[in-house]
Image (cartoon, rainbow, N blue to C red):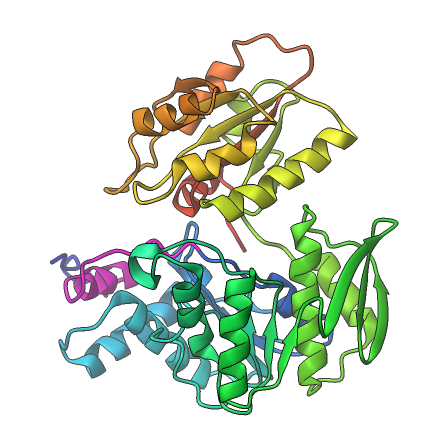
Amino acid sequence: MTLPAAGRSPSYNDILTRLASLHPRRIDLTLDRMPFMRAILEAAGLRVHVYTSPHLVRFNERFRLGKVGGGVLISDDELRAALDHCERVNDGEPITIFEIETAAAFYLFSKHQADVTLLEVGLGGRLDATNVIDRPLASVIAPIGMDHVEFLGDTLIKIATEKAGIIKKNVPVICAEQPAEATAVIEQTAKRLRAPLHAATQDWHVNIERGRLVYQDEQGLLDLAAPRLFGRHQFDNAGLAIATLRTIGTFKIQPSAFEQGIGRAEWPARMQRLTSGALTNVAPAEAEIWLDGGHNADGGRVVAAALGDLEERVSRPLVVIAGMMANKDADGFLANFAGLTRHIIAVRIPDQENAMPPDVLAHAARHLGMRVDTASSVKTALASLSKLSYELPPRILITGSLYLAGNVLAENGTLPQ
């Protein structure tokens, strides 16, 4: 147990250290987020509370308080007070870190007025700590893939069953396009609970036309500017947010707010361009540096597609710097990049006991026919590339884990706001 120094109030890190002793197991909660929905609601002038996980650099990132003109991350003092309150109420009973964090989020939100609260499910859905709201405005299911199999099951049907656990009786469900097995599970659950289902490609559609986002449902058509976030998949993510808010209908959002929202939305560590900072300073001159926290086969697929789009616009040699957790499928993830690059640099994620050793990651890359190097850190890897000769400045992707992405942002001095 870590005790605060004499005369000093405990920080929230002190409290988290104590709480970890009640449930020390760590879970890699690498999740997809919905920044578009928050951005659209804020563009419509609404105050939006947001609870998401995991954080990248600072724990405060998980808690955003709704304010007029845009939300703000919780302050250290408010976070410490909320965790301290929840720790006292829990009174030493067994509890997971995520459960106490979720309780703290509900406590914080209850003390600040807002128009809407967005809760991101932590892991799975059915047994998740956030799944205690009896009557949400809507339940939203993003694309389902093979991940967290040790907790959710080793088939898409099992995983979809856990995800479908957030569906509530008579509450609308807005669902992204899914594999057939997952779709069947969601449809059956929605029918059993009489929850109106609004599914992508069936009840609403999103397309790219002349570089613009074109959305259509039974209410009509929206012709909007492209999302600020890069990658084809971000059109689908924006479409899911639009479909949700149009289905709810509570807030009567104007087309201008939809356009402003998808144009403003930011999502750290999802095809994020790093243009300045401590790490970029050691990279090859004029190199493009992209950061993405993708970590499974599906995540690798969408990142590879985004890189393919970049290659069509401006061709550059691609180098992938990768670090992954030991429980991830390195072969499935890296296979997506086999046709785009033959140069992988494997690194270890700092400060993670269950990080994949670089030689294990390197073996997976060699199995795919890639040229492989290892480096002691991302900074060392970037510096090594500065010593190589390229006909054009390289395009560098740093990827494989949100833990790695958070470390990169911290070291580069790029803090999520």
Residue in the image at 53% along x and 42% along y: 300
Tell me where residue 54 appears, x and y as whole percent. 41, 58
Camera-side residue: 180 or 338? 180
> In this rendering, is residue 385 above or below 262?
above
> In this rendering, is residue 184 above or below 238?
below
In the picture, residue 106 is in which quadrant? Answer: bottom left
Residue 65 seen anywhere in this rendered image of the structure: no
Residue in the image at 36% along x and 43% along y: 328
Residue in the image at 55% along x and 31% along y: 337
Camera-side residue: 395 or 235? 235
**Quadrant of the snapshot with the N terminus:** bottom left
Tell me where residue 30 appears, x and y as whole percent. 42, 54
Camera-side residue: 155 or 10? 155
Q: Is 77 one of the magenta-colored residues?
A: no
> In this rendering, is residue 409 above or below 13?
above
Tell me where residue 144 appears, x and y as whole percent. 50, 60
Residue in the image at 21% along x and 58% along y: 25
Write the start and end of the magenta stretch as one range: 9-30
Residue 99 seen anywhere in this rendered image of the structure: yes
Tell me where residue 317 appears, x and y as whole percent. 64, 20
- Say whether residue 244 is left or right of residue 97: right
> In this rendering, is residue 165 above or below 230?
below
Q: Is 15 one of the magenta-colored residues?
A: yes
